[in-house]
Amino acid sequence: MIGTFGAAQLAWGTDLEVAVLDNNGAPVSHVVVYALPDRPALGGGHKRSKTTATMGQRDTAFDPHILVVETGTLIGFPNSDRVSHHVYSFSPAKNFQLPLYKGNIYEPLAFDEPGIVTLGCNIHDDMLGYIVVLDTPYFALTDEHGMATIDAIPAGSYTVQSWTARLPAARLPPAQPVKIDTRPVRLTIQFASKLFPAHAHEGSSLTWRDY
Ligand SMILES: [Cu+2]
């Protein structure tokens, strides 16, 4: 029956492909793109799961440089270096310290508030990392061609937003409304302001979907 088939397709949704460009029209990598449902799923629609992710330290750098997770994710901070690190954040979304340590001595921490968590190390001033905590499982980072693909978004209404540390929050582009049905959706986000230079460690960025 055609009607039944149509309903099944709607439940599956489609892919959302987003191109991110700088103020000169050049592609930008390592930009977080995410789709927030206009009507968040009620209890269990999408998980606020106890997924575990890792923000390691390797070669005196946070690894990855940018980690994107859904709200509620547990994150471990294993130190693979021979030197000790002292990881901290003063960000309102997660204010914490892991005093001077080697190895993997601390239990994973729960990231229960959405927001940008900026990480530093008390010992190594050039260590800088970000955890982007989102109230949605629908996110991706742009690749070297400035493309982010968010797979299999359920049908519905969303607002699509972007984040990069290379612009102050006030200069990030406005959210774009997007309707998802069964046809793939392609969207372009262009930054109006000139971006700050990328951090040297940016290349290691990944989302927990890469694990
Ligand atoms: Cu350190």
Image (cartoon, grey):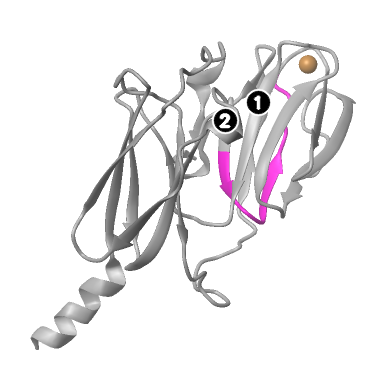
Q: Secondary structure at mark 2?
A: strand
x%, y% of residue 123?
Answer: 84, 13
Identify the mark nearer the N-term, 2 or 1.
2
- Relative to 69, is 193 on the left or the right? left
Residue 42 or residue 203, whichever sits in front = 42
Q: Residues within 10 Å of mark 1 (few under 14, many from 20)?
A: many
For the record, the magenta segment spans 68-80
As for residue 72 lying within the magenta part, the answer is yes
The residue that appears at 69% across and 43% down in the rendered structure is 75
x%, y% of residue 157?
Answer: 37, 65
**Rendered position, 13 above or below 23:** below
**Rendered position, 127 above or below 42:** above
Q: Quadrant of residue 154?
A: bottom left
Q: Amino acid at mark 2?
A: Ile
The residue under label 1 is 129
Dot 2 and dot 1 residues touching (CB under 8 Å): yes
x%, y% of residue 175?
Answer: 45, 48
The residue under label 2 is 66
Q: Amino acid at mark 1?
A: Gly
- Relative to 84, is 204 on the left or the right? left
The residue that appears at 77% across and 32% down in the rendered structure is 104
Q: Residues within 10 Å of mark 2 (few under 14, many from 20)?
A: many
**Rendered position, 17 above or below 154:** above
